[in-house]
Image (cartoon, helix red, strand yellow):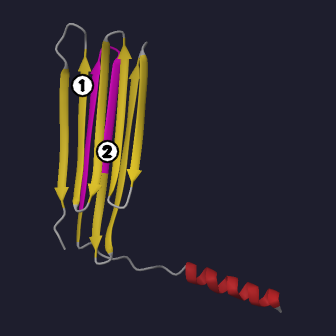
Amino acid sequence: MSKTISLACLALMASVAATPVPAQDCNSAGTVGSAGSAAAGGTSASTLGTAGACQTDDGTTASIGSGGSAATADGKARSQTKINENQNQLKAQSKAQAMDQGTFSKSQTKTRVKDNELQSKTRSMSHVPGQKPVKSTTDSNVVLPQQ
């Protein structure tokens, strides 16, 4: 008898867990993103970041993503991405750098979702010794309306 009840309970729990929950429409939503790359000599580096948020009557949900890569023909290349989350914000940072002798390329992207603000900023730079560095910045910022 206990096996029959246990199987019936499992079947009931499975049917409840499989019941779809209706989606809520966003009262306000936004996305941001930035990316950049740099190249000099035989080096290159690129990073990017993106984030999105949706405000509903039940609160705000957000997502974030970031990444980067670096390459060099003969030198050293490295890249790293960190994503941090706490109750107040989502934060991502990606860095990529390639070096060959004195020539280098690097890129860094910082992306953040905090309160009703989404931000993403990328800075990239390449340099060949004896020449002026080449720099670029891309920036994206969205403020969601207060509910």
Task: Give yes or no for residue 97 being in the magenta stretch.
Answer: no
Q: Is residue 77 left or right of residue 35?
A: right
Q: Amino acid at mark 1?
A: Met
Residue visible at 25% across and 56% down in the picture = 31
Q: Is residue 19 left or right of residue 23?
A: right
Rendered position, 48 above or below 9: above
> Residues at badges 1 and 2 in contact (C-beta under 8 Å)?
no
Residue visible at 36% across and 38% down in the picture = 94
Q: Is residue 145 left or right of residue 56?
A: left
Q: Earlier in the sequence, mark 1 or mark 2?
A: 2
Mark 1 → mark 2, Cα distance in angstroms: 17 Å
Q: Position of residue 114 (x, y in %)?
A: 27, 57
Judged by its main secondary structure, the magenta piece is: strand
Q: Tell me which segment is drawn in magenta.
A: 30-50
Residue placed most toward the observer, 39 or 114? 114
Residue visible at 25% across and 21% down in the picture = 126
Marker disc for residue 125: 1
The residue where tag 2 is placed is: 49
